[in-house]
Image (tube, rainbow, N blue to C red):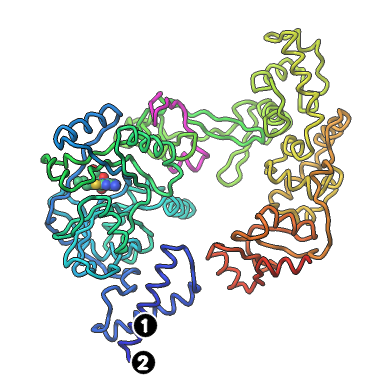
Amino acid sequence: MTPAEQIHNLTGKLNYYNQRYYQDSVSEISDYEFDAMMKELIALEKQYPQFRKEDSPTQRVGGTVTKEFETVTHKRPMLSLGNTYSREEVEEFDKRVRKEIETDVIYVAELKIDGLAISLTYHNGVLHKAVTRGDGERGDDITNNAKTIHTIPLKLNGKNIPEEIEVRGEVYMSRKVFEILNEERKSAGESLLANPRNVASGTMKLQDSAEVAKRKLSSFQYALYGENLKISNHWDALDKMQEWGFTVSPHRKKCHTIQEIVDFINYWDEKRHTLPFDIDGVVLKVDLYNHQEMLGFTAKSPRWAISYKYKAESVTTKLLSVEYQVGRTGAITPVANLQPVILAGTTVKRASIHNADEIQRLDLHDGDYVFVEKGGEIIPKITGVDVEKRNPGSKPIEFISDCPDCKTTLSRVTANHFCPNEWGCPTQMKGKIEHFASRKAMNIDGLGSEIVAQLFDAGLIKNIAGLFDLKFDHLVSLERFGEKSAENLINGIQKTKEIPFENLLFAIGIRHVGSTVAEKMARYFSNIDNLMSATYEKLLEVEDAGEKIAQSIISYFAHAGNQEIISRLRKAGLQFEIAPENQTIKESEKLAGKTFVISGVFKNFSREGLKEKIERNGGKVISAISGKLSYLVAGENMGPSKLEKAKKLGITIIEEGEFEKMVG
Ligand code: IVH
């Protein structure tokens, strides 16, 4: 093969694998093989630059360093959009549009991706320039950086591509990539980044494109410009773009009425946290180009489009104090009390701050103004401090040294503080009882935190076992209790005798044993005696059980106080044995001693069903692939990284049919 042919071949192959990976999430070859081919191509291109292809995948890995970005004047100014915040404003927009065009109108509703705008020019189907929005008139040439983004095509697919087109879109960082980036920074002791948009925007301005490539940015394209495109509306333009190889958001809708628009807006307001990227609203565009022309532009924005912005997701407010909560296991969680502020439609007064490291990372001071955000999670969090508003004399917040309740000196394990007074700290004891009564545990109606505190403070119960000594007469004499409520509570406690062993095991509150682990332990050991006498190694055999869990179970049962509680609960008649219908019925021991990882989907089994089959035949299903794994059962659409890892480690990979043969 001549060097030209080699370059041609490698370019084609690598582009194909890239496309399979980035568009279809399939790795057809290992990272190792891919890297080797890439290295070969880089070397060849260096030696024979004249044969380098315009869509060479080597551009995706970056490596160019731009000292200063060149300023480029946009052929068409990059305008912004008028914002609306309510249904009424959308209605007004619609009225203005209808008044102007005087016939029925079709809108295209799209997501407003929260990133930064980019303009891409293609000459004869090849990416020519990528430019930032800048001031709308002129922007920075960031072509080399843009080339590292896999969702920006270097060369377009298909024939009859116009000589010159411009495409605009949004560059963004997915939440997942952002989270990983922040996790890495955290583990390296670096300050955390505020949000994906800022990182995306900062990244596009990095001088070293190899650094940009590492940031794994993405992009959606949402507008097409060019001469003689033979397209008459925006909707078709999006389809055309997609055909050419651009990434167009699939979440778009043609709307004929205000109601359809409002439905789209509301749907995504609720669902937006399920998207893998941030959006800050919805964009509405008049579909027909001749309608767009009739409507024209204002100085700043088109009259044929508008954005509907979701309510601000980040606000600034004042930190009033930091309070420390004691959990049922003694873990201390700092909580910020805030000047009440409206965030995403609800009033926020408190935010969690996780731990002492987080206080340090934020460098929180008394009376600071803090940024509060509500992400996918329910509890809002403090994401940063507005340092400029800080009072010069204010002191840094210092983590407490003693338990706020029982005053015991706290102990610290890595970033987390604990009150070690497990058997004497009232907050912890109450927390354990509350946990016992909670819905996923013993589900005792009418035993919420207030009643628990009342019973505990009155000296009627000291721990969970005490609940079973409560008498009707004790309760009716208490404030807030009537005959009815006393009777209900007693009944509620009695009913726990029917609650299955799995729940009870979760309810007793062994540290690190959540409801899932409890269920697995219950199934594995069948009854409390087997579990109590299990060795550390035996505990580790249970799926999902790691060293932390095994150790915690051992120390729980080693404690005389816990042993006493268990024996009192036993006397009270609670279920300490798994019900026969929940027991794993053994079919054979054919898979004894073997471990399995299940990945993908199967024809004859649900994943749960397959797992059960393995367990019934004495095998064990685990979640992580390691060198010790016996088999990987590979279904369809299994994750490429799992497959690769298994291959690298030389694990035996079997398909559904082979598995069926194994169990007969
Ligand atoms: S259309 C003439 N569509 O929102 C304006 N913009 O202020 C053309 N954006 O700078 C913009 N998603 O960066 C449009 N689906 C979408 C968008 C979108 C995000 C950004 C864009 C623009 C800003 C509008």
Residue 471: image quadrant is top right
- Considering depth in this image, is 8 or 402 the residue closer to the camera? 8
Residue 631: image quadrant is bottom right
x 20%, y 52%: residue? 232
Above or below, 555 relative to 640: above
- Considering depth in this image, is 285 or 21 the residue closer to the camera? 285
- Considering depth in this image, is 70 or 652 the residue closer to the camera? 652
Which quarter shows the N terminus? bottom left
CB atoms of marks 2 and 1 within 8 Å:
yes
**What residue type is disc 2 on?**
Met
Residue 55, given in percent of the width and then of the height, sits at 29, 73
| Residue on which disc 2 sits | 1
- CA separation, marks 2 and 1? 10 Å
x 36%, y 29%: residue? 317
**What residue type is disc 1 on?**
Asn
Toward the bottom, the furthest residue is 1
- Residue 166 is a magenta residue: no
Instruction: Please state the extent of the stretch shown in magenta in the rendering.
Output: 340-361
x 47%, y 52%: residue? 183
- Residue 345 is a magenta residue: yes
| Image-based side of 396 in relation to 575, left or right | left
Q: Which mark is residue 9?
A: 1
Of labels 2 and 1, earlier in sequence is 2
- Mark count: 2
Residue 36, given in percent of the width and then of the height, sits at 44, 79
| Image-based side of 48 in relation to 584, left or right | left
Above or below, 303 relative to 645: above
Mark 2 falls on what kind of element? loop
Residue 266: image quadrant is top left
